[in-house]
Structures are given as structure tokens and as C-alpha cells.
Image: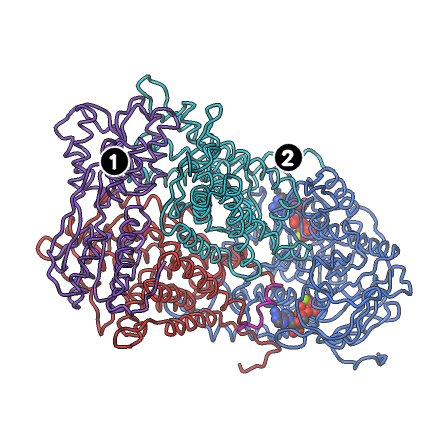
Chain colours: A purple, B cyan, C red, D blue
Amino acid sequence: GKKNNAAAPKYIIGFSQCNSAEPWREAMNKQIESEAAKHPEIKLLVSDAQQSNARQVSDVENFIVRGVNLLMISPNEAKPLTGVVEKAYDAGIPVIVIDRKILSDKYTCFIGANNELIGKEAGEYAAKLLHGKGRVVEIWGLKGSTPAIERHDGFMEGIKNYPGIKIIYSQDGAWLREKGRSIMENALQRFDKIDLVFGQNDPMAIGAYLAAKDVGRAKDMYFIGIDGLPGPGGGIQAVIDGKLNATFIYPTGGKIAVQTALKILKGEKVPKDITLSSVSINPQDAKEYLSGEK
Amino acid sequence: MDKTYRLKFSEREWIKPVFGVLIIFVMCIVFSPTNTKGDLVFLKFENLTNILRQVSENGIIAVGMTYVIIAGGIDLSVGSILALSATITAFGLMDWQLGFLITMALALAVSSIAGFLNGAITSWGKIQSFIVTLAMMTAARGFALFIANNNSRDVGFGPGGAPSVFAVFSTSYWGIPFPVFIFIATTLLFLLVLKKTKFGRYVYAIGSNEEAAVLAGLRVKWIRTYTFVLAGALSGLAGIIHAGQLMQGNPNDGVGFELDAIAAVVIGGTSLMGGKGTLEGTFAGVLIIGLLSNILGLHGIQKDFQLMLKGAIIVAAVFVQEGGIKLHPLRSMSRNKGETSRR
Amino acid sequence: MDKTYRLKFSEREWIKPVFGVLIIFVMCIVFSPTNTKGDLVFLKFENLTNILRQVSENGIIAVGMTYVIIAGGIDLSVGSILALSATITAFGLMDWQLGFLITMALALAVSSIAGFLNGAITSWGKIQSFIVTLAMMTAARGFALFIANNNSRDVGFGPGGAPSVFAVFSTSYWGIPFPVFIFIATTLLFLLVLKKTKFGRYVYAIGSNEEAAVLAGLRVKWIRTYTFVLAGALSGLAGIIHAGQLMQGNPNDGVGFELDAIAAVVIGGTSLMGGKGTLEGTFAGVLIIGLLSNILGLHGIQKDFQLMLKGAIIVAAVFVQEGGIKLHPLRSMSRNKGETSRR
Amino acid sequence: MLRTSNIKKSFSSVEVLHGISFAVEKGCVTALVGENGAGKSTLMKILSGVHTDYTGEISIDGKPVFFKNPRHAQQLGVSIIHQELSCIPHLTVAENIFIGKEPARRFGVVDFPKLFADAQSILDEFEFPYSPNTPVRNLSVGWQQIVEVARAFSADAKIFILDEPTSALTENEIRILFEKIRVLKKRGKIIIFISHRLEEIYEIADEIAVLRDGQFIGKYPVKEISRSELISKMVGKAIHETKQIKSSASSETVLAAENLEVYGKTGTILSGITFDLKRGETLGVAGLLGSGKTELLKFLFGELKAQHTGRITLEGAPYIPKCASRSLEGSIFYLSKDRKTEGIFADLDIIKNCSMSVLSDFASFGFLHEKEEAAAVRDQVSSLNVKLESYHQSIRELSGGNQQKVLIARGLLHRPKLLLLDEPTRGIDVGAKAEIYELIEQLSSSGISSIISSSEIPELLRICDRILVLHNGMPAAILAAGETSASEILHYAFGEGKAWTKPTD
Ligand SMILES: Nc1ncnc2c1ncn2[C@@H]1O[C@H](COP(=O)(O)OP(=O)(O)OP(=O)(O)O)[C@@H](O)[C@H]1O
Ligand SMILES: Nc1ncnc2c1ncn2[C@@H]1O[C@H](COP(=O)(O)OP(=O)(O)OP(=O)(O)O)[C@@H](O)[C@H]1O
Ligand SMILES: [Mg+2]
Ligand SMILES: [Mg+2]
């Protein structure tokens, strides 16, 4: 919903989101929108590139022509968006890049967490749960996308020292709960013994849990996800409900982004890189975390 | 005069797709991986019911799609309507606390209205259904996002949550998930309607020759509209099941479902030109797609090979049905008799 | 030959879509946001060239799609072929170091072969093009992923990188991006081919009445195949441009492009039944889609409203062209003359 | 010389040609006659490369040939007009005429000025009223037929096969067509002409070949075989061609139109139409191509969707034609002359085609009683002597004439009060025609009125009580069938007489 304040906004901020169809990104949008709503002096324009580099280039072009005072962008992929972000920056528009970097230093501020690090934490946590030995199913995000590759690499890094941990099955779940579920169904048929499921995001991990629960095998294995979104459908709640054994908060940075934007617009100096740290959520501390969040 | 008709066998259009299913089924057995005990994983009862469950949504949507396509139209909006219905289901149960029956009724009603709009604009607005349903595909998703405030809604039980009867969609009876029963029942019911009722007959007629149907006194516009209403309603039903299986109403779900459903219909031998086709065939088409995904999934084949294989197998399956093995002696000449099949 | 005939039939089919573009264009001006200086943002030269650049890939693909659809087929594989071509372009320039010309030739050749397979299997395998190209849509993407080893490949210049001439695709001349020139040139060339050459007329013939075309001695199978080759080649060309604009070959790109292209063709007044349509119309259809996205994007409207609006506007645009304003006096008569338009 | 020897052809194991051997000479018009379903079209399709799965041999001038496909047959000098219209609707008249042999410049660019000029000169001979630039889909069936004739005649061929080219034409065009045939004959071409109108055959043919049930019966010089002999050769038994059928018109008016004007999008289609139709009466509509016969019938059925003025009454009450389903509810049935695009459901079987308009009679709660349905259809269809393999066979497998009979059966099943029949005997053989005439006689004696449009004037004279002659959408005369003649009707049809004065010829 948009509320128009009586005072005309002074600044237009264009936010180019690469894909709003994922809960994590939608959470980012929500954070940005609710933070922006607190500041009547800004008018926020949001565009959704629906996972297409080309469309996101167009979105940014539109913002440039529109004459936004600041551009926030969460790029779909680094290279394809580099050119148009540079173009905006060269046109004198301050740019905040969120979550995924571009291949150039022509931006004002980068805010993001490190996927590889989170993957590694997840891997280490898995090793701990499994006591260094076990059979793992990995459900990938969209094959070929950077976060999927980074989370996978991190996870492998985390279990590197435990040769007893084997990935016995991995499939592309395209970040979708529905895919997570059907992939897990196949895995359950194929393997009588599965010790842990690593979903590269929470929805896929929850999907896998639902599949295992339906055949009464959910108790036989651990489920780990990533994202740790708050709210009733998020990963934290899933940990509390016992669906997931752990999730790792991958912060969206939406709130900080808007705050940083305001600073930039007011002419204050901001750091070039803001790295957000991840928090691991397990059943012990999930409840506290959720109430602390509120 | 009506001597035992020599062509009878070959007139059973659905034999070919069923034959296709059998071939794929046998191939699946041959290529099945074995589990640690040495059993064929593919043939396990659980795996077979899994397949049925996995295809049940597509199967239900494909039933409506078959009607639309036989009547000479196409419906691209089914995936969005599914998402809309799933979203309404989740919100109806959780936020609006409407209870089980009213929520279901609401989801079905909204889906049917979307279908009705598809049909009415196509019929009376004289716009190709491809465009109308493409617009609906966009608009229905927008509406779902609007309802959900761009979020997805999880369904939970317990106080303040959904009534426990909603768990039926993720329950199995005699080892068979409930959605499978709905899928089979829907297929059977509408198979009867298509074959045995006036309405079914009219659907074929308007797809075969719209002009002649008008002159024969059929209310072509209404009949076409009903097919879209049916497709909308069944997508809505699939949406309820979707929400029930994933315990979530997600306005972003169901992307690309229209292609799966159309593929099932076409693999099942229905021509996109309209006028002919069967629901038995569609059922077979749904199974072919399901079996294929299952066997490739069981092997955990990498995505690139999986996609290449899938493409090749689909063409091969249709080719075996259509050309390679000539079960249908009339095929080759039927071309000369005014049947310009859409290529 | 200045004879006065008893009846004159005006047949400027393309007037309607062009009329549609104009309406949308005027609406865009009316609803254009203004920038701080008070100028209409929509009308800025930069914005207009942006629009053309943004639609150029879809526009080029839609040219090939128009041929395929007029000939009575459909091509769902264009998006995947674009991805394949873009991937080959990136790898050819970077990893395989083939140089500019050979890389381009390779990308176009592979795309054309994919198109040829589409056409040949459709024609000689006697399988509906929907299925064949659906399979190709799957397989070509699998092949692209295979080449790219499930990754995307960035293109860079400098030593060990791509030849600098490749930068042409992201360069503007007289303020107009190079891809726009390719788009316009392609449209004009194939517009002439469609209108003026035997091949073009045969494309109409086989889509209009395949059976009659066979009886008239046309090589229907080959003509159909050529349309698919053209669609493949042009998707390949769009893929090269895609890689050139984004400086990346990404095997996951181009998803859903087939719907955009088909939508442009159909909004442009071409019937999915085949036999009629124009490239002027398709050009208009491409612009309508582009203008719509642009104006909605300029306003930064929320996604849910944006989708709902878009759906409504598409239907409205087509409706104005087709039904509301009757520019075509013969419309209703033609219904009686053997033209059963697909709904 | 074109010779076939022992040609056999089966459709899915049903043999329809049982060894046809015959020869046709150059410079001679050979008419091929036979009942519906005798195998005429099938044989011609073999001779033009459409069917290739036959046994036997074809030779031209003693050299054996095998036509691989229609294209190949064309290259070997065969030009054919198929029985079913096979124009390409979305191309222009000129493009249709020259399809596959367009004059072209470099890069395959068509020389349109030449194309149109060439087309125009051919069309002029047929007094074709439209521009060669008109898309064929906008033409009435008759003019489409002319386009096909023009296409066939524009080919530089040795063999011309004309499969019922005249079924949609009127006297005027047939006269022109015959002139062209005579020219070809003089040039020594081989011409095979198929028609169910015996008058025509006696006018143009030199020799008559008879086919019966897929057997070749014989070839006879036209002068040596009388009409009744010919018929009994075709049918296998003697048939009495009914003379003037007996009138059952009562004095009660069923349908009346007064000064009816119908406006199309480009102008007036019909004007000044005034007539009345009595119960049991059969009113004929005659006129040249484009005179508005089809339009009148379609308008009365409610499917022309055009503005009109004037007064129409149906059974005394004012009547405004709305749409097909309303008209059918009011027991008005219309049979289109365009069988393929407005008649049959090609994908459906005979039963379904037949019962489409009356399904409610066989349904309870929407569910069909297929047995009752089949029985009713069988009753009706068998009374029309349709040649079929099975009632569950797709209608597209029937010969053209038999398809027509199935459509007539559809109308009869509906138990209409008023029949609007546009060329009801188009493509129907002599025997069946006689049956249909009898049928119409029966119907009118049971109080059913009909309006029948036909391009065959002798037919109208035989079956109608009165004949309305149209010229350019205006009534030129209403004549009592018993008191007029073909030449009088033609006189009016050409627009030579001004309205109601009795002609002097
Ligand atoms: N494609 C087909 N499939 C099955 N049977 C066919 C097919 N085409 C023709 N026949 C059958 O072959 C026989 C001969 O048909 P054909 O069309 O040659 O008759 P015809 O002499 O031209 O009749 P008409 O005077 O009605 O045109 C008929 O019994 C018909 O049913
Ligand atoms: N497509 C059309 N668009 C506009 N007017 C038409 C069209 N077709 C026919 N007409 C008008 O209707 C009049 C009569 O039509 P039509 O040619 O069908 O008459 P007809 O006597 O039934 O001829 P036919 O024997 O060819 O069927 C024509 O003179 C023409 O003015
Ligand atoms: Mg025939
Ligand atoms: Mg007519």
C-alpha cells in the first residue's frame, strides 16, 4: 500500500530488485518499504526484474531517465548489471548495491552478507550434528546462479575435513518449496538412509521436511536451511516448530540500505562496504531470537 | 448395414498415448536404480504413489485444459489461477478465519470467475484466447500478490490456525495420498461428461468447425465460455490442493504450469487445432511427464543432461505414438481429407 | 488496369495494430511522469531510444515467430535458443578464442540447426510443433548448461578476452543503440521477404490451407522447415545481441521469451490459426508491449497493481483494435466465408 | 493418350476401386459419371498424385508414369480442379490462380504487376466482378469455384481433370467454362470432366465413361447412349427421373416478406424483396452468381447479421431473424451450400454429425442415450441411401455427395416447418437427386414449406411451385414453375426484363 503524505517528497529513490518472487527478497522489499515509509521526504519507486538480467538493465535505465536522486539495486548477476550501474553512477546518481556486488567500483556503497561464509557455517554445523559421518542430500538453488554456487562451495568447505560426510544426492530445486518437496520424495525412494538434508534456502528445506514427514521419516534425519526469515512462514519459526534443525540468517540489509541512502542524500559520508554478519539459529536460541527481533 | 466395423480398433484415439505410457513405464523399470536391498526403486509402491501425487495438480489442471483445447482455445492463465486460489485458501483459513468449507467455496468461486472472464472476453470480445488468457495470467497473479500483500502465507493448525480437516490434503489413505483420489475422480467424472453428455459433444463440435456449429444451432459462445469456467475451476481446485500439500499459499507459485498442462494434453494426442482428443490421452500424457521426471530424478542426473534427455524422450514418445509404430492405418490418408493438422 | 469493380475490399490488416500503438503512445504521454524540470520523462529522446533498445531482442525474435505462426506453427524454443546462442558467443569469444566472425557464425549456425531440427521433426515426423519446440526448449537449455558447465560466462575485453569489435552491441550511434538498428533492419528485410517474395507468399499459403497448398504443388514440408530455421537463426541473432548487451552468456537467460514474442505477434493481429498476419502488426505489437512496460516502469508502480493493470491494458488494446472501433467494414461478413478464427 | 490399367485402391483395407482400366484420348472430352461414392474422385486423385498407395499402372502416351505427389503430377502435365474447393483463403485471387508459378524477378521477388495483369486477363473471360487483388476468403463459393477453374486453365498442361467444376456455378459461367473446354479440346488436350448434371454432359462430352461401385462399366460415345440407358448403367437399375412434382401448397401463408431491404457493410445486398410462402409450398430462388441467393436464405435464417428494413411475418406474426439457434427452435432449418466450411464436422462421425441439432431429444439430465440417438440417425440416414462403411466412421471419409445426404438427414431429424436449402443437390448423383426430390414432395405434402436456391434451373422447374428470380439482389420476377421455362428464367436472371411484364420470347 502507498500512502501519500501531504508534504511533497524531496527525493526519489529507485530500488531495482532482481526478483520479488522469493520470500527472502520479498522480505528485503518489505524492510525497505517500511523503512522508507517512515521518511516522508523520500518517494520510493520499486521495480522487479523477475530474475532477468535484461529486464533489470531496462529497469535501471528507466530510473535514470526518470531522474531518481539515488539508485538502490540488488543485482541479478554481477557482470550484466555492471554497465548500467556505471552509467547511473557516471550520471551523478549515488548507487547503493545490495547483496551482490557489481564488477566495478563505480558505486557509492555496498551492503551485503557473504554467502560463502554462511554456506561454510552450515557445513560446519552439519558436521557437528552428524559427528563427522553421514549421508547428505543437498537441494540446490537455481543451478548456475551465484548464491547457489557460493553456498554450495561454502558448504563443501565446511565439511571438507570430514571425509565420512558424503553428498549422496543433489538436485536443482530452483529455490522453490514445491521443488524441494518433490526432489526429497525421489531421494527418499532412492535411499533408505539419509542423515541430513541441506536446503540452500529455507523454503526448499521445509519442502523436503514435508516430504519426509509424510512418509514418517522426518525423525530419522536433520534438516538445515538458510535465510532465517522472521514471521510465521519464515525459517526461524520453522526451527521453533521443529521442522528445521537449524537455519542461518542471511540478512537482507534492507533497513540499513534506506538509512544509508538518507545519509548519502543528506551529504553525509558513508563507508564503501558494509558487510552484514550472519547468525545461526538452532532450536535452543530460536525463540529468544524471534522475541528479541520484535 | 452397420457391419462390424473394421476400423474400430484404430478409431480408439487414446490407444496411442496409453501405448506411450506403457513404453515409458517399461523403460522406467529397465532403467530403475536399485536401493541397498537390491529392489527396483522405481517399482516400489511408495514411489508409484509418489508419482501420482506429484502429477495430481498438473493432472487436474490438464483436465480443464483438455476441454479448452478440444473446443479450439488455449488457457495460459491456469498457473496464475492456481496461485490465486492457493493464496485465497491460505488467507481464508488463517487470516480471515472463514473455516474450511467457505474458504474452499471462495477459492473455487474466484477461480471460476477468472475462468468465466477468460471465456466471456474471448467469446463476446472476439479476441483470441491466447491473448485473453495471457492477460489473465498477468492479472490473476497481480491480484494474488495484492491479496497477499506480496507475501506468501503459511498455513498452520492449532488455535488461531486452520481447521484440522484441512490436513486431509496431506494425508494418505491405504497408502495413497488424498490428492491422488481427487485427481482420479476428477479425471473420471469429466471423462464421462466429455464422452456421454450433450455438453461434451458440443465441445468437440465447436472445436471441429465453429461455423458449422453456429449454423447447427449451438450456442457456441456459451459453450466456449463453459470450457474456460471449467479450466478456471479446476485450476482453483488444484490450487487448494497445492496449498494443502505445501501448507502455504504463495502468490508466486504455479509459474510455467500452463506449459506442463498443455504439454500433457498434446502428448495425449489432442490437437491444438481443436475438434479432437480424449481425456484418456491427457491422463496418459500427464503420466508420461510424471514418469519421466521421476526416473530422471531418481537417478539424480545433473540438470543439463536431464534437460537434454527429457527433450529427446518427449519427442521420441510422441513419435512412437504417432509415426513410428503405425497403429492407426488411417493416418496417412486422413491428410488428404480436409484435415489440416496444425504443425 | 483502372477498372471499377463491383466490390472493393480494403485489406490493410496492419492498420489496426498501428492504430493500437498510437493509442498507447498517446496514453503514455498523458500519463507520463514529469521530472524535476517539469519535462515529460516519457517523451525524452533517451527514453524513446531506451524503449527501442529494450524491445530489440524481443522484436527480432518476434520476426521469426511471425513467420512460424503465419505458416500455422508455433515455436516455444526461442528463449532457450537465445540462451544457447548467448552462451556460445561468450565461450567462443572468451574460452575458445575463436574471434568475432567465427564465433558469430558458430552461434548462428547452431541456432539455425536447432531451428532446422524443430522444422524437420515437425514436418517429417508429423508431430505438432508445440510439442517439438517444447522438447527443443528443454533440450537447448540443457545443451547450453552443458556447454557452460552449469555456469554463466562473463565477457570481458583486453588480452585473453573478447575482440574489441564485440563492443559494437553496447555502442550507440547518433544516440541510438546499435541493437536498435539491427532490429529495424531485420524487420524491414523480412517484411519485404514476407510481402514480396514467393517464399513469403508460400508461408501464408501453407498456414492458410495446408491441404490446398499440397494440392497446389508447394513443398509444404520444406517451406515450414524454413520458417523454423528462420526463427532459430533470428533467436540466435538475438542471443548474440543479448550477450553483447549484458556482456555475459548465461544459459539460464531467456526464460519466458517465447511468451513475449508470441504475445507481440498476436497483439499485432496475427492469428494463431495461421494464414494471416503482418510484420507491421508484429512490429506494432512489440512496441505496444515495450511502451506498456516502460510507462509502468517509469512510475515504479507496485508489482501487484502493475500486473493487474498490464493484463487489463493488453486486453483493452486488442479490443480497441479488433472489436470496439470497426475500421474494417468486411469483418462480420468474412465470418461467413470459411474463416473460422481460432478463439 | 492417358491409360490406366487395373487400378485398385483401398482405404484402410476397404477396397473402393476394383481394378479400373480405361483410356482417354487426346482432343476429346471424356465425361466420367457414376453414383456418389462410385470412386470418381478417388480415381482422379490417383491421376493427380494425391493418392500414391494404389496398385495398377498409369501410362501417358504409352509411357508408364507414377505420380509421386501433386507437385510431380503437375510437372508431368496434369492440371486438376478438385471436387472440394481448395483455394487458399488468405491469398488474393491472383495469387491463387498462379500459385507455384508466379512470375518472379530476382531473389524470388514476385512481379506483382504482371501477376495481377495476367490474372485480370484470365478473369475477364469469366466476367469476374472483383479485383484480382481480393482475398479469396471474401468470395462466395461460386466465385471461388471460378478462381479454381481459372487456376486449372492457366496451367500449361496436357491433361485437364475437372471434378464437378460446375456444381457451384450458374448457366452463365458454365457457358463460359464450356467455351474454354472446347478451345482446349481443339488444342488436343486430354480432358476428363465429372458432373452429376446429365444435361451438361450431353452438351460438352464426346465420350462418357461410367463407374459403378468402383468398377469400370464401360465407355460410350455420347451419341450412342440415351439418358435412361446411361442412368441404368450408372445405377445398375432403371430409374425414373421424376417429372414435375405434385404441388401441395395450401392457401395458408407461412412466411411473407414485404419490400425487404438488407444492407451489408458496403452497401445494399438485397432490395425490394417481396414474396409469400404458403404452407407446403416450395419456392425456388434462381439467379446468377452473386445475385444474392445465399444471402437471402442466410438472412432469413438469422445468420447474415445485417441491418434490414421491411416487414417479415412468420405464421402471421412479425418475424425478425436473430440467430441460428433461435431459428432452429422455431423449426426453421438451413442447409448451407458450403458443405466443408459451414456444414460438416470433419472430425466427428456420421451419427454425431447428424444428431448435432437435436441432441436434446436424446438426453436426460444432459446425458445422452446413445442407442436411441444411433437408432434415430440410422432410420433417417438409411432412408437416404447413404453409401457408408459404418455409422461410426468419420464423415470426412464419405464421398462429397454422401456427406451432403448426411447433412440433409440432419435437417430432417429436426422435423422442421420451414426448410431453407441452398443448393441441396450440390454434388448429388442422379439417383439420389430423384430421391431427394421425392423427399421434398413428401415433406411438402406433410405441410412443410421450403425455399430452395439452386443454380440448376431444370431442377427448380421440376421441384418448385414458384420461382423467385433474383438479379443483383433485386427480384426480377416470380414465376409459376408450371408456366415458365429455363430461358424465361435466364432472361430475368440476366436483368434483361424489367420486373413483372411477361416476356415475349
Ligand atoms: N479418405 C477416405 N477414407 C475412407 N474412405 C474413403 C476416403 N475417401 C473416399 N473414401 C471412400 O471411397 C469411395 C469412393 O469415394 P469418391 O470420393 O471417389 O466417390 P465419388 O465417385 O467421387 O463420389 P461423389 O460423386 O459423391 O463425389 C466412397 O465409398 C468413400 O466413402
Ligand atoms: N464478402 C462479402 N463482403 C461484402 N459483400 C459481399 C460479400 N460476399 C457477397 N457480397 C454481396 O452479396 C451479394 C450476393 O452474394 P453471393 O455472391 O453469395 O450471391 P449468390 O447468388 O448466392 O451467389 P453464389 O451462387 O455464388 O452463392 C453480392 O453481389 C455482393 O454484393
Ligand atoms: Mg467425388
Ligand atoms: Mg452465395
Secondary structure beneath disc 2? loop
From what the image shows, is residue A20 above or below residue A83? above
Between D52 and D250, the residue placed more toward the observer is D250
Q: What's under tag 2, amino acid-wise?
A: Arg
Left or right: residue C219 compared with residue D251: left
The quarter of the image holding the C terminus of chain C is bottom right
Between D203 and A132, the residue placed more toward the observer is A132
Residue A127 on image: x %, y %: 18, 28
**Structural distance between the alpha carbons of marks 2 and 1:** 72 Å
Is the shortest distance between ligand 1 and the CB of mark 1 under 8 Å?
A: no
Say which chain tag 1 marks. A
Residue D91 colored magenta?
A: no
Left or right: residue D11 compared with residue C262: right
The residue indicated by pointer 2 is B6
Residue C72 on image: x %, y %: 47, 55
From what the image shows, is residue B15 above or below residue D210? above
| Foreground tag (2 vs 1) | 1
Secondary structure beneath disc 1? helix
Q: Which label belongs to residue D11?
A: none
Q: Give the range drawn in magenta.
A: C326-336
Q: Which label belongs to residue A286?
A: 1
